[in-house]
Image: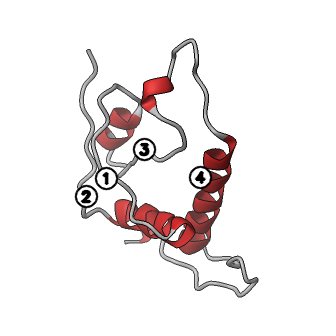
Amino acid sequence: QFAPGRTPVGSPVVAAVAAAHRAETGAAPALRGAPYGSDLRLLVAAGVPTVHYGPGSVRHAHAPDEHVPLDEVLGCSRTLVRLIASVCGGPDRTGVPTTPGRCPEDS
């Protein structure tokens, strides 16, 4: 029904998201394909390396008991802040400025 989309596991965007996740949680993220269609395929087809990252479980998506635990939403938000700071530069949680990274289009 949907065309597939794939970003290589060695892609810089995968490494950046994994590093932010690890910094926030202390654990490596699970890297796996998604068993559903999404707009990721459109971005990948346009040459934009893309990943799915977020809280919750696909088991609860679009179901009568659909929900996402608040602690997962907050943890994901903190991870995304770390990711943005690492790519764009900005203060970390200690207030110490980070060195700006290079945006993918600068590569």
Q: Residues within 10 Å of mark 1 (few under 14, many from 20)?
A: few
Q: Which residue is mark 3?
A: 52
Q: Label 1 amino acid?
A: Leu
Judge left or right: residue 19 versus residue 83. left
Whether residue 97 is situated above or below residue 4 in the rendered picture: below
Quarter of the image where one finds residue 64: top right
Marks 3 and 2 in Cβ contact (< 8 Å): no
What kind of element bears circle 3? loop
Q: Find the distance from the CA under tag 3 to the CA under tag 1.
A: 10 Å
- Marks 4 and 2, the one that precedes in the sequence: 2
Q: Label 2 amino acid?
A: Val
Q: Mark 2 or mark 1, which is nearer to you?
A: 1
Residue plotted at (48% across, 75% down): 102
Q: Which residue is mark 1?
A: 31
Q: Residues within 10 Å of mark 4 (few under 14, many from 20)?
A: many
The location of residue 90, given as percent across then percent down, is 68, 76
Q: Is residue 31 visible?
A: yes
The location of residue 37, given as percent across then percent down, is 34, 25
- Marks 4 and 3, the one that precedes in the sequence: 3
What kind of element bears circle 4? helix
Q: Find the distance from the CA under tag 1 to the CA under tag 4.
A: 15 Å
Q: Label 3 amino acid?
A: His
Quarter of the image where one finds residue 12: bottom left
Q: Which residue is mark 4?
A: 76
Residue 9 circle label: 2
Judge left or right: residue 10 versus residue 64. left
Q: Mark 3 or mark 1, which is nearer to you?
A: 1
Q: Label 4 amino acid?
A: Cys
The location of residue 107, given as percent across then percent down, is 37, 72
What kind of element bears circle 2? loop
What kind of element bears circle 1? loop
Residue 73 circle label: none
